[in-house]
């Protein structure tokens, strides 16, 4: 007897900032759309446990797509003649192109790491289009890493190097198989993709000034951060919540920077109450 998972994968072509991009996405469940954004240098498989959880999929249509240059999504035509560098504008445009292509009405957008950062901008700019945003390991500005020399290391284009770099962001309590599955996604990263994502994460995503200039109220914002994360420290998340009207923070015990894939059961215990709150508000 084969135990088939409920996840369905599909491809579609969308226009992002005037360029056609072939995107791969997976989905499972029905109900309120929950669009999930992967971390830098990785892909949508990080959300496979969430898509197989009937407690979630009975109420939410969970969708996760690979950004261009990531996973099974292609880069746009002409990629070979440019250096990939993710910008905040392109990131938001890609997310909204995905939402519009599937005619998703008032979705919840949940992202981790760089995805947890970009949802804060979306909470302001797309407040009338979104039910809520959930930022995993997210804050509204980059936190200081005291040695950034690794960005210019010649091996930074290599997936093995990227996996080694992020390995310390995984909590020591995370199960060994989950730890290695998390790192495998980084081993798979395309040449220069993680470095290109770092352009967004390190230099093009300080939203503190933008947030102060916003006159409109953001949609509901939930920020969830693991206690072992030094890339987005708990204190960074708590400071961001102080700057975002109505935002709520959850500090998760026993997890690091990749909660949905490094320790799905612990993450689930923190996420379900937030999803229940969002579901009950609709």
Image: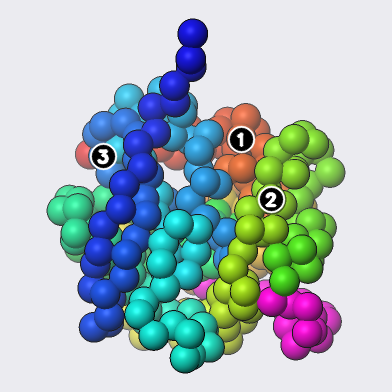
Local packing at callout 2 (Cα closer than 10 Å; few below 14, some 14-19, many 20+) is some
Residue carrying label 3 = 32
> Circle 1 — which element?
helix
Q: What is the x, y in percent for residue 48?
A: 50, 38
Residue 184's disc is 2
Of labels 2 and 1, the one closer to you: 2
Q: Which mark is residue 264?
A: 1
- Residue at image location 48% in from the left, 17% down from the top: 3
Q: CA distance from mark 2 to mark 1?
A: 16 Å
**Camera-side residue of 55 and 7:** 7
Circle 3 crowding by C-alpha within 10 Å: few under 14, some 14–19, many from 20 = many
Q: Is residue 150 magenta?
A: yes
Between marks 3 and 2, how big is the CA–CA gap? 30 Å
Q: Earlier in the sequence, mark 3 or mark 2?
A: 3
Which label sits on residue 194?
Answer: none
Q: Quadrant for the C terminus, please.
A: top left
62 relative position to 70: left or right: left
The span shown in magenta is 138-157
Q: Residue at x 70, y 38 (%)?
A: 178
């Amino acid at each position: 007897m084969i135990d088939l998972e409920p996840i369905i994968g599909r491809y579609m072509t969308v226009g992002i900032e005037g360029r056609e991009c072939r995107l791969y996405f997976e989905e499972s469940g029905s109900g309120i759309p929950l669009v999930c954004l992967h971390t830098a240098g990785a892909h949508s498989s990080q959300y496979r446990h969430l898509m197989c959880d009937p407690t979630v999929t009975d109420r939410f249509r969970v969708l996760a797509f690979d950004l261009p240059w990531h996973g099974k999504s292609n880069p746009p035509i002409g990629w070979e003649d440019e250096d990939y560098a993710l910008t905040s504008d392109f990131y938001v445009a890609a997310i909204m192109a995905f939402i519009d292509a599937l005619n998703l009405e008032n979705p919840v957008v949940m992202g981790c790491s760089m995805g947890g950062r970009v949802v804060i901008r979306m909470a302001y700019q797309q407040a009338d289009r979104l039910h809520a945003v959930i930022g995993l390991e997210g804050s509204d500005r980059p936190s200081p890493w005291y040695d950034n020399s690794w960005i210019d290391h010649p091996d930074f284009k290599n997936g093995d190097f990227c996996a080694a770099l992020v390995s310390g962001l995984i909590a020591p309590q995370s199960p060994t198989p989950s730890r290695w599955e998390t790192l495998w996604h980084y081993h798979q990263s395309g040449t220069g993709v993680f470095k290109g994502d770092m352009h967004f994460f390190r230099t093009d995503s300080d939203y503190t000034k933008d947030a102060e200039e916003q006159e409109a109220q953001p949609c509901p914002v939930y920020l969830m951060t693991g206690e072992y994360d030094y890339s987005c420290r708990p204190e960074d998340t708590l400071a961001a919540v102080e700057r975002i009207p109505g935002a709520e923070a959850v500090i998760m015990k026993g997890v690091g920077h990749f909660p949905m894939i490094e320790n799905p059961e612990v993450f689930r215990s923190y996420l379900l109450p937030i999803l229940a709150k969002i579901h009950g508000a609709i």
